[in-house]
Amino acid sequence: MSLIKKLILLSLLILVLLGTGCSRLFEVDPDVQAKQALLDLMAIQEKYRQKNKRYARNLLEIDSYNLKYHTGIVYLEIESAGKDKYRAISLPAESTTARVFAYDTQNGGFYEMGEEEVSHYVLGSLNHIRQKQKEKTVVDYLSAAMVICLAWFGLRMFLRYRKHGNGWVWWPYFLSILPLSLAVAELNHIGEETVFSPTLMGLMAVSFAVSLLCLAAAGVSFSKIPESEIRDVLRGFAICTLLIALFTSATLVHSYIDLTAPKVQRLYFKPGG
């Protein structure tokens, strides 16, 4: 399989992964804090059980473990507990994503609730949240369609005009589509409460580096394009690569500035000591 075909397949794979994993990649702070609150509760429950031979039935029983949370923002509850089992749930009190986390010893431990179970916990705002999520999904599909069209158009032109010596035009073009996929996803999903996670930071750094590489390669390709009847076509693709790389780089820099800008500190959850 040629390098160009590999780049095209990789672009499509990244689009699929971004489309299915945006809610996990672009997490919001209340969801992260709610999840952390439940994880800390799980650790405290194990300590409590070792000492008392049973799990705590409510948060008052583990008050001495200094598990602190802001009930106005994170809702944390031990729904049931016994000697060998317990169930607890955690979610943002004002959820914007309809994500609810649970720990149930009889249901495999820690898990994130599915849509049907979520409806029992996120009540009044659920329809509004689902509508907002559908709007973002539509934008994701349109963005993916745009990127796929760029890849498909490039593939058709590559199959028509490929010749020995003009690879300097094609590989930067297809490679530039990879970071573009992340850039258009960020425009739709990054907001004031988006968490700048190590995974997201790593993807942005790699994407920015790839964009700069494509930018440099596209510039060099002008001097590498051979004299032929398709010279103008190849120059056009080199210019497209420059524009894609510039757009991607600018979007990534703007997103980074937004994510790292000082934010108003709100206490969602304070881990116990």
Image: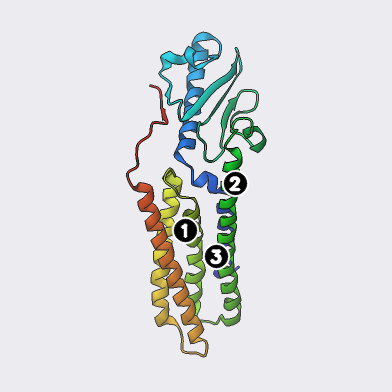
Coloration of the structure image = rainbow
- The relative height of residue 173 versus residue 201 in the rendered view (above or below) is below
In which quadrant will I find the N terminus? bottom right
Q: Quadrant of residue 66?
A: top left
The answer to the question of whether label 2 and label 1 lie on touching residues, with beta carbons closer than 8 A, is no
Q: Residue type at mark 1: give it.
A: Ala
| Foreground of the two, 195 or 49 | 195
Which residue corresponds to mark 3?
Answer: 7
What is the CA distance from the residue labelled 3 to the residue labelled 2?
35 Å
Mark 3, Cα crowd under 10 Å, few <14 / some 14-19 / many 20+, is many
| Label disc, if present, on residue 234 of the rendered structure | none
| Foreground of the two, 217 or 44 | 44
Percent position of residue 171, x then y: 50, 71
What is the CA distance from the residue labelled 1 to the residue labelled 3?
17 Å
Judging from the image, what secondary structure is the residue with disc 1 in?
A: helix
Q: Residue type at mark 2: give it.
A: Gln
In which quadrant will I find the C terminus? top left
- The relative height of residue 9 versus residue 204 in the rendered view (above or below) is below
The answer to the question of whether label 3 and label 2 lie on touching residues, with beta carbons closer than 8 A, is no
Mark 2, Cα crowd under 10 Å, few <14 / some 14-19 / many 20+, is few
Q: Residue furthest left?
A: 262
Mark closest to the chain's N terminus, 3 or 2: 3
Number of marks drawn: 3
The residue located at (63%, 28%) in the rendering is 108
| Label disc, if present, on residue 183 of the rendered structure | 1
Which residue corresponds to mark 2?
Answer: 131
Percent position of residue 235, x then y: 46, 81
Judging from the image, what secondary structure is the residue with disc 2 in?
A: helix
Q: Is residue 273 left or right of residue 122?
A: left
Mark closest to the chain's N terminus, 1 or 3: 3
Percent position of residue 92, x then y: 50, 33
